[in-house]
Amino acid sequence: MIRYTMVLTLFMSLFVLSCNGQQPGEASDVQKISDYVAGKGYEKYEVATFAGGCFWCTEASFERIEGVVDVISGYSGGEKDYPTYKMVSYGQTKHAEAIQIFYDPAVISFDKLLEIFFVAHDPTTLNRQGPDVGPQYRSEIFYHDQTQKEKAKAYMKKLDASGKFKDSIVTKLSKYEEFWTAEGYHQDYYEHNPQNPYIQRVSRPKVEKVMKVFADILKKKYQK
């Protein structure tokens, strides 16, 4: 796992590599999201696409929320088709690590997803989330329609005015173009690799924060 870090050591990065058993970018299962979900009946759900640092963290955070049907890790906001993890990590495609959320609007709103997004990561650090540094870890909302754009814009303005964050929000707001699913070993990585050092030290605190703040809308299996 190639991660630029001031806190975790190179040894930890190598350990992550040994855990998933693959070198980044070697997998061949990067797909267009439309191909990935074909036949799953997701057409009846609405979609949100967020980038907020390592997708292992954000995917796990949103998966715990009632009304969220599926969260898929992948890449968005770049210029190259079928980007691999290695390409994205080395800044060769301009993509961000992102998640595609399929949700039931009868259970949870886009407004609530926005609230969760701004708790699940730090929107005030440019091209960085904690130990992860680089434009692939940027904070970005990819809006699917004008309604999402206006809601996101208004909510960010509200947050900045509230003084909730010490620094100004730097989250980008961009029109959604395409989403590419990350290699298979990235999907549900948090669940499959609970003892991974990165998961323990970086991802887990973020996920637990979301679970604490939004305890009232967690799926039953995650309720204490």
Image: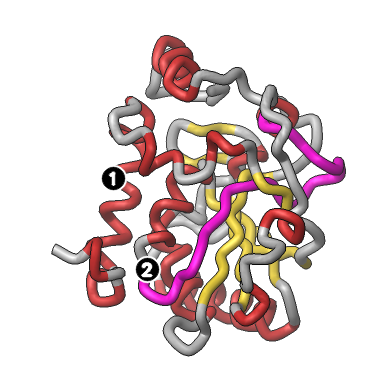
Q: Are marks 2 and 1 in contact (CB under 8 Å)?
A: no
Check disc 2 and report the residue beneath it. Answer: 65
Classify the position of the C terminus by image quarter: bottom left
Marked residue nearer the N-terminal end (2 or 1) = 2
Query: For the view shown, which residue lies furthest in the left direction?
Result: 224
Residue closest to the eye, 182 or 92: 182
Query: For the view shown, which residue lies furthest in the bottom direction?
Result: 106
Residue depicted at x 77% and y 52% = 32
For residue 212, side relative to residue 53 (left or right): left
For residue 49, side relative to residue 122 (left or right): right
Using the image, determine if residue 94 lies above or below residue 98.
above
Residue closest to the eye, 204 or 34: 34
Instruction: Give the secondary structure at mark 2.
Output: loop
Dot 2, crowdedness within 10 Å: few (<14), some or many (≥20)?
Answer: many
Whether residue 31 appears in magenta in the rendering, the answer is: no
Q: Position of residue 17 (x, y in %)?
A: 50, 18
Query: For the view shown, which residue lies furthest in the front direction?
Result: 39
Using the image, determine if residue 221 lies above or below residue 10.
below
Residue depicted at x 63% and y 63% = 49
The magenta span reads 66-85
Q: Amino acid at mark 1?
A: Pro
Whether residue 72 appears in magenta in the rendering, the answer is: yes
Number of numbered discs on residues: 2
Numbered disc in front, either 2 or 1: 2
For residue 132, side relative to residue 192 (left or right): right
Dot 1, crowdedness within 10 Å: few (<14), some or many (≥20)?
Answer: some
Q: Position of residue 76 (x, y in %)?
A: 72, 51
Residue depicted at x 24% and y 63% = 221
Q: Amino acid at mark 2?
A: Ile
Q: Position of residue 18 (x, y in %)?
A: 46, 15
Q: Which mark is residue 205?
A: 1
